[in-house]
Image (spheres, grey):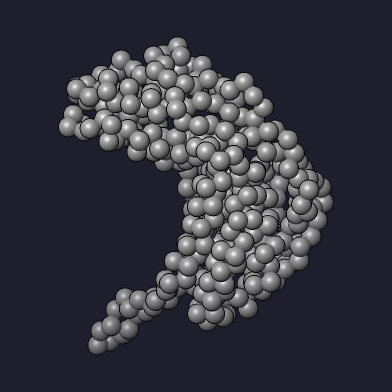
Amino acid sequence: MAEYKLLIGGKLVAGDATMPVLNPATEESLADCPRASARQLDEAVAAAKAAFPAWAGKPIEQRKAVVVAIADVIEQHQDELARILTSEQGKPLPDATAEVAGMAAFFRYFATLDLPMKVVEDSATRRVEAHRRPLGVIGAITPWNFPLLIVAFKLPMALIAGNTVVLKPAPTTPLSTLRFGEIISRLVPPGVFNIITDANDLGDKLTHHPDVRKISFTGSTATGKKVMQAASATLKRITLELGGNDAAIVLDDADPKTIAPGVFDGAFQNSGQVCLAIKRLYVHEKVYDQVCDELAAIARTTVVDDGMKQGAKLGPLQNKMQYEKVKGYLEDAEKHGKVIAGGKPMDRPGYFIEPRVRGSSTRSSSARCCR
């Protein structure tokens, strides 16, 4: 097994404990992952706080150069990162490769942006300018559905603005993030970027920490509420990217064969584990049956398999808790609608479930609902 380390104060260190990380396609252990203690979280925050003045004092162009260098290293290690990502997250390897490429692309994009001074007033009697100043230590908490891509939605912006970061990945998908930290550790001054891991026991301490000035959280709405409540104790700034309950609408002039593949991918990409995935589909009754038939045909022929295997379109659900939750949803759906295709747990190791299309008799403005 590969060895993984935390990144604290520029050093790669063992956790005070360890925890297993499972491959969701096999339910077998991938690695004994380092697990940080509360003491190590404090060390990471202290390192970030100590590094902040010097990092904030660097010209923005120097900070951008570091972010571009990170993008270069991501691309150099794309295949390795993608394979780790598939092993721990479950998504097919081509999707994982695209995620790593997207990660690098976002680092490059954010390095093209500036934080310009804004003239608020320039009159005969006074001139008022608004200058952006970094906040300090940023606590970033990332989820298990896009472990690397969402790092790219948080880290480069924080670094370019002059902040330092303590990143906590999801307990079930920490390995690709830890490897990312290792390969960029020499590019970033010590303490500017730190990674700690936990078993869902350090989030509250991070959000309450008096030396953390902002929390950027991506995850469930329920946990987002807890983050907001915890951050309020110290008046931290927060950014919350939470789950959605999104619908799509198919009008009566749509061609079912043309729109069905896009609708299916919009619902089932990443095995449906996307915050903005289509959760329900409102279809005009004129084309309802044809749309259901097309979606059912796609569901029945979609290859659900280990993401490392060639031809896999969908991988397993990422973790056992999610797997059991989805099984509960499917059982409930059978009681309240017509199953058109799929939706059975697969009789094999791993957290595999067939994609399901469910019809409903719900009517609204000549539309019917398909889920």
Rendered view: 31 above or below 41: above
* Extreme-front residue of the structure: 310
Q: Nearer the viewer, residue 17 or 43?
A: 17
Q: Quadrant of the C terminus?
A: top left
The quadrant holding residue 298 is: top left
The quadrant holding residue 265 is: top left
Percent x, y for residue 76?
A: 60, 65
Residue shown at the point (60%, 25%) measured from the top left:
324
Residue shown at the point (64%, 52%) measured from the top left:
176
Q: Nearer the viewer, residue 202 or 91?
A: 91
Q: Is residue 200 visible?
A: no
In the picture, measured across the screen, residue 222 lies left or right of residue 41, that is left
* Extreme-bottom residue of the structure: 124
Q: Is residue 33 visible?
A: yes
Percent x, y for residue 282?
A: 29, 28
Rendered view: 117 above or below 294: below
Rendered view: 77 above or below 30: below
Percent x, y for residue 326?
A: 54, 26
Q: Nearer the viewer, residue 207 or 313?
A: 313
Percent x, y for residue 215?
A: 56, 55
Residue shown at the point (34%, 38%) measured from the top left:
262
The quadrant holding residue 306 is: top right
